[in-house]
Amino acid sequence: MPRSVFARRLWSGSAVVLASVASVLIIRGRHKAYASDAPAYRQKGPAAARVTIVEFSDFQCPACGYAVEPVQRLLGLYGQDVRFVFKHFPLKQHAKARAAAAAADCAGRQGKFWEFHDRLYASQADWVPAQGKDPLADYARDLGLDSAAFSACRADPATAAAVEKDLQEGNDRWVLSTPTFFINDKRFSGSRQLTDRGVLWIDRILKKK
Amino acid sequence: MDRPNTEKEVIPRHPALPWLGIAARMLVGLVLVMSGTYKAAAPPEEFALVIDAYRMIPSADLIQAMAVFLPWLELLVGFALILGYFTRHCAVAAAGMFGVFITAILSIKLRGIDLPNCGCFGFGFHPQPLQTAIMDALLFGAALLAYRHGPDRLSLDNWGGSGYN
């Protein structure tokens, strides 16, 4: 037992620090493995690009809609140095986000993922509040997709399972909000972090190699 | 001639008061530990996003630094209060934090900013701004009570040599 006041204070302080670190480590848990893969139709840029940006996004989330333009600007700026991967992360509070994610994947299987993606974000104010109608089927028709194949794909449990897989990966990566970006595995939450700090991070990566 | 009574009159304390002080210390400590642990364990970029939403800090680097530093401050002060280490200093620090939180919440209400979440109690619990301000005010009061009560027989300060009163 430490006898001096100083030694006791030191032991007490150590107990406080130890309890703090232990509680964080317990909550943080073990690091889970994940891969930055996605169907080819949800990727842009060369596979061998030096920078990979992975976005976890929710079609019903307004902040994700605001992020479309900065992302496009970034991809235009860095061209062939960047590969972009889109992942679904439909939030619980967004009732139509899962259906929209599945529909976008179905459009992707017919080669129109990005067109559908842009339409969903541009028309959030129309399809999100729509009741008793199916605007997503209308968008598919507008884009010239095969309606029967599109409907069959939306009803296919494998489509929902693919969305679920992305969601699980997001949870494993501790994604808590959308949009969340990972640039070569470094996290940027929201489009402001992407444009403020993400650009600097990309420049650093490109300078290194 | 009788000598005047110079001794102070001691007002007897209610027997429940010391326990109330301990309860206040534990309550404030537990809240800080719960909110600090989750935020410190989560990626700091998530908390940085919340701090940014308050639109009070102009520098992105400072926001990022605060997102790393603040949860650990909450956590350390929380555990120090629970264990009764530098009890009075930590009670003042806790009251100061709750004062800052109340000011920040009221300022976003006044400026009409709509927060996705207040980031106050960790990411699992998102009360409305007014509820948050009320909870923070109650915790501010509890922190002051913990300060007034000071170290007690259950605190490390007692073992550490400062004694308790």
Image: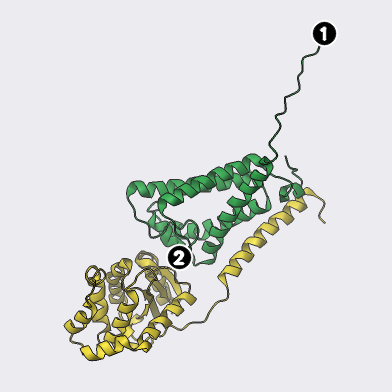
- Quarter of the picture containing the C terminus of chain B is top right
- Identify residue for label 2: B45
- Identify residue for label 1: B1
Question: As displayed, is residue B125 above or below residue B154?
Answer: below
The circle on residue A4 is: none
B71 lies left or right of A138: right
First reached walking from the N terminus: tag 2 or tag 1: 1
The residue at 58%/41% (across/down) is: B144
B10 lies left or right of A143: right
In the image, what residue type sits under mark 1? Met
- Disc 2 and disc 1: Cα gap in Å? 77 Å
Label 2 element class: helix
Q: Which chain is rendered green in the image?
A: B
Image coords of residue B24 (percent x, y): 61, 47
Image coords of residue A181 (percent x, y): 39, 73
Residue A44 in sight: no
Image coords of residue A171 (percent x, y): 47, 75
Query: Residue at the front extreme?
Result: A132
Mark 2 residue crowding within 10 angstroms, few (<14) / some (14–19) / many (20+): many
Question: As displayed, is residue A80 above or below residue B150?
Answer: below
Hue used for the chain lettered A: yellow
Q: Chain of mark 1?
A: B
Label 1 element class: loop
- Quarter of the picture containing the N terminus of chain B is top right
- Whether discs 2 and 1 lie on one chain: the answer is yes
Query: Residue at the top extreme?
Result: B1
* Viewer-side residue, B158 vs B131: B131
Question: As displayed, is residue B123 above or below residue A181?
Answer: above
Question: As displayed, is residue B78 above or below residue B18?
Answer: below
